[in-house]
Image: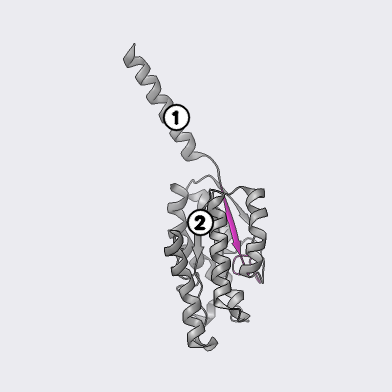
Amino acid sequence: MMRTLRTVAFITFALFASTAHSASKTILVLGDSLSAEYGLVRGTGWVPLLQSQLKTEKIDAAIANASISGETTSGGRTRLQSLLSKHRPDTVVIELGANDALRGLPVAATEDNLRAMIVTAQKAQAKVLLVGMQIPPNYGGDYTRRFAGIYPKLSRETSVPLVPFLLEGLADKPQLFQSDRLHPTAEAQPIMLHNIWSHLKPLLLK
């Protein structure tokens, strides 16, 4: 009798664990034009490509893309709480900061906004992936270094994984950028997805 009860308990636990692992997840992407398919045909950006990747990997997850062209860290910080309440994401991908730098906003303010978003998402029981950005040296050596340093610093402080640089592997390839020289082409999107995926997948499988 005792052996039968143990067997039933084990099977029940296994079924529960399997269900919990396979339960549908929601990924919230909070970004700017780099994640909002600026200048691209709909469905060709890295975020839609991510949805296809999830299907290929048989990971049951839906994506809520809340990215807006021109978004700053201040705007993302303002919108995040309502997005968390609406979508209740398991994972939040924060891809913001480039527009702060383009406008020459104070590095300290950008850092404070990103930190606040990370903490807010964590308080909502969501895992966070921080996406790092870098800017060209023509913005001034000091500003460029301090801006690039924000992301690894916050990753260490808040214990969240970091994509070191979203545009890794294409920043020095002008043919992979649109005519504005700021936004990657459709051909560059798989590279961006690759940069994201290696850090996002482990979060989804936890």
Q: Looking at numbered disc 2 in the image, what kind of residue is underneath it?
A: Val
The image quadrant that residue 178 belongs to is: bottom right
Q: Position of residue 179 (x, y in %)?
A: 62, 81
Front-most of residues 9 and 143 = 143
Q: Is residue 86 above or below residue 165?
A: above
Q: Nearer the viewer, residue 118 or 184?
A: 118
Colour setup of the view? one colour
Residue 109 position within the rendered picture, expressed as x and y whole percent measured from the top left: 58, 73
The answer to whether residue 165 is above or below residue 10 is: below
Q: Please give the range of residues in magenta.
A: 26-39
* Residue extending furthest toward the left: 3
Left or right: where 119 falls relative to 33: left
Question: What is the x, y in percent for residue 201?
Answer: 45, 54
Q: Which mark is residue 50?
A: none
Residue drawn at (49%, 45%) of the image = 58
User: Relative to 91, is 176 above or below?
Assistant: below
Q: At x 34% / y 11%, what residue is drawn?
A: 1
Residue 79 position, x and y percent, is: 67, 60
Residue at mark 2 to residue at mark 1: CA–CA distance: 28 Å
In this view of the protein, can residue 196 be seen by the observer?
yes
Secondary structure state at the residue bearing disc 2: strand
Would you say residue 64 sits in the magenta stretch? Answer: no
The disc, 2 or 1, on the residue closer to the chain's N-terminal end is 1
On residue 128, the disc is 2
**What is the total number of numbered labels drawn onto the structure image?**
2
According to the picture, the residue beneath numbered tag 1 turns out to be 15
Amino acid of disc 1: Leu
